[in-house]
Structures are given as structure tokens and as C-alpha cells.
Image (cartoon, rainbow, N blue to C red):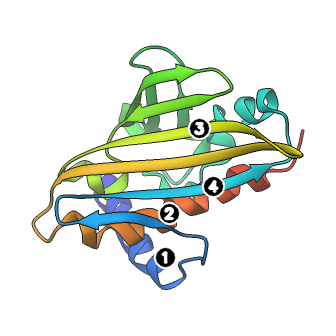
Amino acid sequence: MRLGRSFLAVSVGLAFALLARPASAEVLNAAPGGFVVQHRAALALPAEKAWARLVQVQSWWSPEHTYSGASRNLSLRLSPGGCFCERLPAGGFAKHAEVVQLQPRKLLRLSGSLGPLQALGAAGALSFALADAEGGTQVTLTYQVGGFAADGLDKLAPLVDQVLGEQLKRLATLPAR
């Protein structure tokens, strides 16, 4: 089953990623019932252009952290309840999160359980806050997760932290167009 292998590959990739965790990773809080991770990145772009880059998730999200293995299959619909979704083979799909708050050029908040959290009794709020900074825009990514995992959600916090840190770094280092 392709989806099963993809899920296994994502899980193994997350476990491997823990070994290569960058110094900028920050788990703000972790307990068996949940965790909070946060990352910041400076983009040498004005807020309008940083926003335009952010909402084109398929251009910066790593294909290694998709079920399909291809970032081009990702989409983000900017509307109330809009889907951060992924097309899968044979008409399949994955709904990663949905838009719950949008303030153009300032804040994008999604509600959803990313990656392996999707199979657990967990819920998450993923926020991207944009603020003017010297020479461009600062993007702050915060992911708050709560719920149940048999071994505790705190065990997954470093893995999720590393993966989201990688995504924000990709957003920040995407070549200008």
C-alpha cells in the first residue's frame, strides 16, 4: 500500500531528523499532553512579498515531508475553513490543516495535526506571524499541539520541532523571484 509506505517513510525520516536537529530549534514547552514549538526567520523581503511566498506552500515545503513525495501536490486555499491539502495518487488526498484565521501580510493560523500526529488523538494550531523587521520581515512559526498519545506527545516534540524548523528555513532561503 503506497500510503502506508509513505507514512512509514515520513515516520522514519522524522526519527532520523532528530539526530540532525539544528541549533535554532526551540521546544518552548513539552508535556505528555502536548507541546509548543517555535521558530523565527528573517526574510529580506517586504511583508507583502514575504506573505506571497508564505501562502505558496508548494514552493517551499519539503517534498520529504509530504505523503506523495512531491511538494507540487500541496495547496493552500485562503478562505474560512480553507484547506492545506495534498493530492495523492488514484484520487486520494490528505487534509493537513484548515485555515482558521487570516490577516493578510500579518497572520496565517491553521488548525490541524501534521504528519504522524494525524493518526493520534491530537489537535494543533499552526501560526505564521509576520512583522516588519530591519531589512525585511520576520516570520514567527508557532505550533501548539494538545491531545493524547500512548507514549506522550512530549516524545514527538523534538521531531516536530526539527521538521517545522526545516520548513521555515526553506521558506526563508527560497531564491527571490
Residue 66 percent coordinates (x, y): 48, 52
Element type at mark 2 = helix
* Amino acid at pointer 4: Arg
Q: What residue is pinned by disc 2?
A: 163
Asked whether residue 1 is in view, the answer is no
Q: What residue is pinned by disc 3?
A: 129
- CA–CA distance in space, label 2 to label 4: 14 Å
* Amino acid at pointer 3: Ala
- CA–CA distance in space, label 1 to label 4: 19 Å
Mark nearer the viewer, 1 or 4: 4
Q: Earlier in the sequence, mark 1 or mark 4?
A: 1
Q: Which of marks 3 and 4 is nearer the N terminus?
A: 4
- CA–CA distance in space, label 3 to label 1: 25 Å
Question: Which residue is found at the position 9% from the left and 66% from the top?
Answer: 150
Query: Above or below — where is 160 with respect to 97?
Result: below
Question: Which residue is found at the position 64% from the left and 28% from the top?
Answer: 106
Dots 1, 2 in contact, CB < 8 A: yes
Q: Earlier in the sequence, mark 2 or mark 3?
A: 3
Question: Which residue is found at the position 28% from the left and 54% from the top?
Answer: 117
